[in-house]
Structure formats: structure tokens, C-alpha cells
Amino acid sequence: MQKDSSPELQRNGTLFRFSTVCLNFRIAKERTERVSGYDFRLTTGGADYLAIEVKGMRGRTGSLLLTPREYELAANPKEHFYLFVVKNFRESPFHEIYQDPLSRGLRFTRKELIAVQVCWFTNV
């Protein structure tokens, strides 16, 4: 886990650095291009990559969930998966980064949810 104002991730001697502006752009780009199971992918131009899932919370503590697809990708290959959690949006945001969140420091519990979706229809 890492806390600082300029997030960095290091893997195999390669330093990945990104900013909030970069995060916002890449998240929007990835979500429109494909349904990947993570918010964006950092690469060095080769086959190696880091899959980054971003979550946000209003307070300093709370709960977050992973979708079945996010959980599946976090499990394999787990050394490539990072969870970037922005906390305390209400007051003074800060972030924490978790590499391999399923095995290191976070306990995820499986829950089955029933969702109600509201939509509007019309005849044309």
C-alpha cells in the first residue's frame, strides 16, 4: 500500500507514474473502448501491463465492491492488478494503492445482490 500525492507503481524495475488528470482521461477512454474488468491499463509498450481499478469513497473508511469480472481479473494474474482507492471525497481526498488486493491486506466477502433497474420505454 502506498500513500502520497504523486502516485507511482513499480514493477520489474519499471516505474509507472500517473496524475489525476491522466487517471480521468484514461478511465473515460478505457470504459468507452471495451468492457475490460478494470478502469485502465498501464503499459511500457511491450506485453507487460498493469491493470488499474479505481474506486472512490466519500469518507475515510467504508465499503467497496468488486464486480464478478473485476474479482476474476484481480485473481489472475494477480501481480498485474492494482486497486487505486480515493478516500475522503467529502473533506480532503487522499488515495491508497493496493497491489494484488485479494491476497494482501483486504478481505473480500462474496455477497449475492438482487438489483432493481428502472428504465423508461416509449413507442415510436
Image: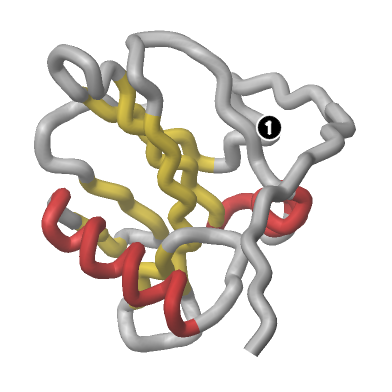
Residue at screen point 34% across, 10% down: 60
Residue on which disc 1 sits: 103
Residue 21: image quadrant is bottom left
The amino acid at mark 1 is Ser
Q: Find residue 80 and report its horizontal and vertical position in percent.
A: 54, 58
Whether residue 27 is situated above or below residue 29 in the rendered picture: above
Which residue is at the front of the view, 4 or 21? 21
Whether residue 85 is situated above or below residue 68 in the rendered picture: above
Left/right placement of residue 50 relative to residue 94 reads right
Question: Tag 1, which secondary structure?
Answer: loop
Left/right placement of residue 45 relative to residue 63 reads left
Left/right placement of residue 104 relative to residue 23 reads right
Q: Find residue 27 and report its horizontal and vertical position in percent.
A: 34, 63
Residue 85: image quadrant is top left
**Display coloring:** secondary structure
Q: Looking at the rendering, in which quadrant would you find the N terminus? A: top left
Residue at screen point 78% across, 40% down: 115
Q: Looking at the rendering, in which quadrant would you find the C terminus? A: bottom right
Q: Find residue 68 and report its horizontal and vertical position in percent.
A: 77, 50
Whether residue 82 is situated above or below residue 121 in the rendered picture: above
All told, the count of numbered labels is 1
Left/right placement of residue 83 relative to residue 108 reads left
